[in-house]
Image (spheres, rainbow, N blue to C red):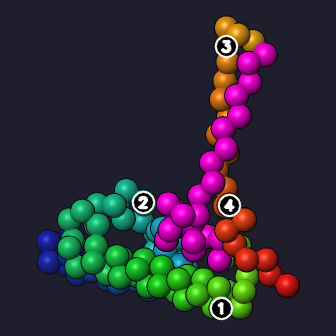
Amino acid sequence: MKKQSKSRYTAKKQKRFLEVYKKTGAYISVACDAIGVTRKTYYEWRKTCPVFDEKCDEIEDSLVGFAESHLMQNIKAGKEASIFFFLCNRAPDRWRHIQTIEHRGDTDNPFRIILENVDTKKFPTQK
């Protein structure tokens, strides 16, 4: 295959990949399988083609934005799991509670368990 026709072929494959990638929620394996390329090829394209890499980033960023908008909808609806998730990630210094439990049954091999969770005393009770 001549260089120009090979690059045109690659450009068509990349365009099709981006269509499937966006449609499947940035699922690499599914997009690769759909267009008949390997994951290795995908990663090579990301490394060697800045335009393709940027378009993949845009698709991935749009999915993050989509998830964030739904998270905000859940928070506004009073869904506690979403509220806890948001607070633990946005204000971890105030919304993280650590408990340490030490077990000393075997003095030669003591171990420590650290549990991290939300300090629910700081969160108003929902009715």
- Mark nearest the camera among 2 and 3 is 3
**Between disc 2 and disc 1, whose residue precedes?**
2
Residue labelled with disc 4: 119
> Horizontal placement of 43 versus 67: left or right?
left
Residue farthest to the top, as pictured: 108
Find disc 2 in the rendering and name its residue.
39
Q: How many marks?
A: 4
Of tags 2 and 1, the one toward the viewer is 1
**Occupied quadrant, residue 114:** top right
Q: Does the magenta run of residues contain 18?
A: no
Regarding mark 3 in the picture, which secondary structure is present there? loop
Crowd band around label 4 with a 10 angstrom C-alpha radius: few (<14), some (14–19), many (20+): some
Give the residues in magenta: 83-105
Residue located at (55% from left, 82% from top): 67
Choose the circle earlier in sequence order: 2 or 3: 2
Q: Which residue is mark 3?
A: 109
Cα separation, mark 2 vs mark 3, equals 44 Å
The CA span between labels 1 and 3 is 48 Å
